[in-house]
Image: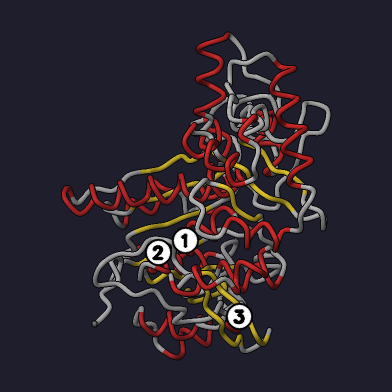
Amino acid sequence: MTSQPPLQGVKVLDLTRLLPGPVCTQHLADMGADVIKIEDTGAGDYAAAPVKALVNRNKRGIRLDLKQAAGVQAFLDLARDADIVVEGFRPGIVDRLGIGYEKVAGVNPRVVYCSITGYGQSGPFRDLAGHDMNYGGYAGALDQVGSDASTLALSNLPVADLMGGSLTAAMGILAALFDASRTGRGRYLDVAISDGTLAHAVLPLARVNAEGKARPAGGDSISGGLPNYRPYRTRDGRVLAVAALEPKFWETFCDTIARPDLKACDRNAPPEVLRRIQEEVARVVASMTLSEWEEKLAGVDCCVSPVLKLEETLRHPHFRERGMVHDTVHPRLGSLTHVGFPVKMSRFAFSVARQAPAPGEHTVEVLRELGYAEEDITALRECRAAL
């Protein structure tokens, strides 16, 4: 089957760095968009090299000095036929540089221009610096993560950055791109990572609406408050995820562990009853190793599974068969494993067609495509407006 990427022919100018913006544009690149990563001529994107190698795959890379008029002009020349611009500077910076939405829309009215910031282009926090933990903290999300209120937890999957920032931005960009294809008129998107995180706080918000306040970390139905939906330690110190919320699954699990007396697990039972069941399940799970549990539960449909380490997941036959693991060789980093694009769609086969570019790797190539003469490219490079 010939692969036909859904965003083939779409041109994206990516001014972002670190994680939220680059992951957003990575998804666009994975779907076939021509994403041109634009770094400055100084430090550029200062994310760690192994991270950059993952989130900038399938992109091309150029370097422009947007503090020079020639660099700004080169950017605007690129923007004339771009479909999407994504930037992650603090509010006001792109306008001061002369590459803000109004300036770009002046040369390309159909452009979709997305600004990703921590707190948005308006509001009292607009100029405040922050990171994932700050955004999650203000959005009421971090308060919900952990085994109890005294031991709030941090995740190595930065939920605010990726869900509130990357995915929220991608959703808005694709909606605006679709509309621009109908109307010929683009839109400006103001994406605040904290807004995107707050917008997905569905379950704690339901509790606020029902009871007046969210329950503390570890106290709600799927955060550890129920014995039939929580992690348990095995004999070898690994973790078994018991997620048997529905009665039929819980009863099957109880039969499997030969503890029919635990079947009467009611979420409305008194706390001391739920605590007793939890202690009993903990003792049972701790009696066997994780591999023994995997063998015992093989073929048992009860929503109980091992908690794998990522390196184990990458070897797992399910994800291998799903095409989610791509072993590649990076020209500078050597062996490099990528995870695949998570949406399977007809007439499209994901691939790592291009490893992450070195800073400025495609500058000359992109300028030539714009029609720049060789002497003009040489002049830009000599004055370091483009590298």
Q: Please state which amino acid type lies under the numbered disc 1.
A: Thr
What is the spatial separation of the Cα atoms under label 1 and label 2, in whole angstroms? 8 Å
Looking at the picture, which amino acid does disc 3 mark?
Ala
Q: Which corner quadrant of the image does residue 349 belong to?
A: bottom left
* Residue 111 versus residue 221 in the image, above or below: below
Q: Residue at x 76, y 39 (%)?
A: 282
The mark lying in front, picked from 3 and 1, is 1
Image side of residue 268 versus residue 372, left or right: right
Question: Mark 1–mark 2 contact, CB under 8 Å?
Answer: yes
Q: Relative to 75, does residue 226 appear above or below in the rendering?
A: above
Residue for point 46% across, 44% down: 168
What residue appears at the point 42 percent right and 51 percent down from the top-left corner? Answer: 170
Task: Give SS at disc 1.
Answer: helix
**As rendered, which of 229 and 278 lies closer to the eye?**
278
Labelled disc at residue 25: 1
As displayed, is residue 165 above or below residue 264? below
Q: Which corner quadrant holds the C terminus?
A: bottom right
Q: Which residue reaches farthest top?
A: 212
- Mark 1 or 2, closer to the camera: 1
Q: N-terminal of the two: label 3 or label 1? A: 1
Category of crowding for the residue at label 2, using alpha-carbon neighbours closer than 10 angstroms: few (below 14), some (14–19), many (at least 20): many
- Earlier sequence position, callout 1 versus callout 2: 2
Residue for badge 3: 358
